[in-house]
Image (cartoon, rainbow, N blue to C red):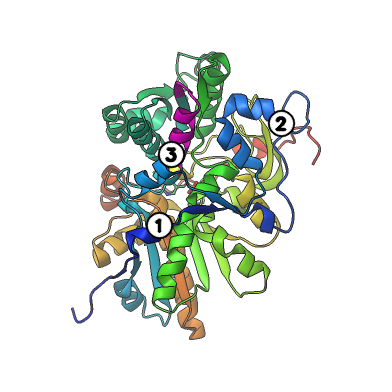
């Protein structure tokens, strides 16, 4: 080993951004407002404030370009930020590519992923406004873990509806959430009307992010002291995640580089947005920059979905959003990248795609785990299955650079570590992972219009 497999680029702690970057004023058009399902009109501020802490409802529509990070949230960020950027020399050598490959390592957060960046802010504002409890949905448990920890740190109760398949088959993160003090319930479950409805339809319902959202919303609407916490969908979540790109930008400047490719996995779009939004206005001003989202073939929101109005939840009671969607009644097969199993992209990610600013590619899970395992052998870092989608896409980009002899700079978001996903790696190692085809039937059924103006 002549050269270290990884080279670390650190920022001093006083360079943690003290403001989040709000892309809304810099976009070619405003994102469509969320619609009230009953009236078909934009959600009233009252409705939003019933759903979310007031400060977050305001951030959702803010047109201020920079929003200050409150001191208490900044103190939380100092537990693990700034996160390092690494140059992956070993992967460059393995691929024999002239491209340079960098990644922003969000696996360093105490909850294991980028999700704590927003969870801390959401728990802070809720506490500040006297909310007693935050209620949320989680797929594989990454978001629930982040919110459970944020709740513990900020002193607020957390209830998590966890996708039933993960609740039973991947209890690791459930135990972690419970250790952080959260109440965790399987979705669909017996404790809400909508949960009982889904179980009645199918007693073996594996659940989805969308069923969990439906249950969490029902509980919030019935309890005036509770508010909803969103892991990804909303503008304010992508806002909080911009720390990722803001820091990474400075780190690349330290080594005199600018990215030609920004790559991230996409479930809803919060780590993609967090990485890429701080560069969107450069791209709009003519910089040659590719932003690439990697998603599972089994839940191909951007590559197989349509840009239209759809419900954010499975029951069709929540707000309507205009974005890329597979249909709110699409139940993705239980693949191992649980964080990528949501039917719709964040409206901001959908808008970037619709405006031609965001490229997308989908991969089957065996290819993804192969890329994740290769990365682990080369660097010692075991990526979350979600993150491994980004790595798989980086391999494609780096190989294309090799064919074109292009010395490009690639930056990807290492959204989380995979140390609680060892069961999935075990299955892959044993050759037992199935590649699930996109369920053509579900897609067809789900693509019927919702009857709302396009
Ligand atoms: C949740 C999650 C994702 C996907 O969610 P986005 O909103 O698209 O970022 C990706 N990676 C990890 C590690 C996650 O926990």
Which residue is most to the right? 453
Q: Quadrant of the C terminus?
A: top right
Q: Could you tell me how many numbered marks the image carries?
A: 3
Q: Position of residue 384 (x, y in %)?
A: 35, 50
Name the residue tied to disc 1: 16
Give the mark nearer the N terminus: 1 vs 2: 1
- Please state which of residues 250 and 427 is positioned toward the viewer in this rendering: 250
3 and 2 marks in contact (CB < 8 Å)? no
Name the residue tied to disc 2: 43
Q: Is residue 266 magenta?
A: no
Task: Mark 1: give few (<14), some (14-19) or many (20+) Cα within 10 Å.
Answer: some
Q: Is residue 121 magenta?
A: yes
Q: Residue at x 47, y 30 (%)?
A: 128
- Please state which of residues 398 and 242 is positioned toward the viewer in this rendering: 242
Q: Nearer the viewer, mark 1 or mark 3?
A: 1
Which residue is most to the bottom? 405
Quarter of the view holding residue 369 = bottom left
Q: Position of residue 114 (x, y in %)?
A: 41, 49
1 and 2 marks in contact (CB < 8 Å)? no
Magenta span covers which residues? 118-133
Q: Residue at x 49, y 83 (%)?
A: 406
Quarter of the view holding residue 179 = top left
* In the depicted structure, whether residue 311 falls above or below residue 337: above
Report the Cα–Cα distance between label 1 and label 2.
34 Å
Name the residue tied to disc 3: 119
Element at label 1:
loop
Quarter of the view holding residue 290 = bottom right
Q: Is residue 207 visible?
A: no
User: Could you tell whether 383 is left or right of 315 in the image?
Assistant: left
Q: Is residue 348 visible?
A: yes
Q: Position of residue 6 (x, y in %)?
A: 28, 70
């Amino acid at each position: 080993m002549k050269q270290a497999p990884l080279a670390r680029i650190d920022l001093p702690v006083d360079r943690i951004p003290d403001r989040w970057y709000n892309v809304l004023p810099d976009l070619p058009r405003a994102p469509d407002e969320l619609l009230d399902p009953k009236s078909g009109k934009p959600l009233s501020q009252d409705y939003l404030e019933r759903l979310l802490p007031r400060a977050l409802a305001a951030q959702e529509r803010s047109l201020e370009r920079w929003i200050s990070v409150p001191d208490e949230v900044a103190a939380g960020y100092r537990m693990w930020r700034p996160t390092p950027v690494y140059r992956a020399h070993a992967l460059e050598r393995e691929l024999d590519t002239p491209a340079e490959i960098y990644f922003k390592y969000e696996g360093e957060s105490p909850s294991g992923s980028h999700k704590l960046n927003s969870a801390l802010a959401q728990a802070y504002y809720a506490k500040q406004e006297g909310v007693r409890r935050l209620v949320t949905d989680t797929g594989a448990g990454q978001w629930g873990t982040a919110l459970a920890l944020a709740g513990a740190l900020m002193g607020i109760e957390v209830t998590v509806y966890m996708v039933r398949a993960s609740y039973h088959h991947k209890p690791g993160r459930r135990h972690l959430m419970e250790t952080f003090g959260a109440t965790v319930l399987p979705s669909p479950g017996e404790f809400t009307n909508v949960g009982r409805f889904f179980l009645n339809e199918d007693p073996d319902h594996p659940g989805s992010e969308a069923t969990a959202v439906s249950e969490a919303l029902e509980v919030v609407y019935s309890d005036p002291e509770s508010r909803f916490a969103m892991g990804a969908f909303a503008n304010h979540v992508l806002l909080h995640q911009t720390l990722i790109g803001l820091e990474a930008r400075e780190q690349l400047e330290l080594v005199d580089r600018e990215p030609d490719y920004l790559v991230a996995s996409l479930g809803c779009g919060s780590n993609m947005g967090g990485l890429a939004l701080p560069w969107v206005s450069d791209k709009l001003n003519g910089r040659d920059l590719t932003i690439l989202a990697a998603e599972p073939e089994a839940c191909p929101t951007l590559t197989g979905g349509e840009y239209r109005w759809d419900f954010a939840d499975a029951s069709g009671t929540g707000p309507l959003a205009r974005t890329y969607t597979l249909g709110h009644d699409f139940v993705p097969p239980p693949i191992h990248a649980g964080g990528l199993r949501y039917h719709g992209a964040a409206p901001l990610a959908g808008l970037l795609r619709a405006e031609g600013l965001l490229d997308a590619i989908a991969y089957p899970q065996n290819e993804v785990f192969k890329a994740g395992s290769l990365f682990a052998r080369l660097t010692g870092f075991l990526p979350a299955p979600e993150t491994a989608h980004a790595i798989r896409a980086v391999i494609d980009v780096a190989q294309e650079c090799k064919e074109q002899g292009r010395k490009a700079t690639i930056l990807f978001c290492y959204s989380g570590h995979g140390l609680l996903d060892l069961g999935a790696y075990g299955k892959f190692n044993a050759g037992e992972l199935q590649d699930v085809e996109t369920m053509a039937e579900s897609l067809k059924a789900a693509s019927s219009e919702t009857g709302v103006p396009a």
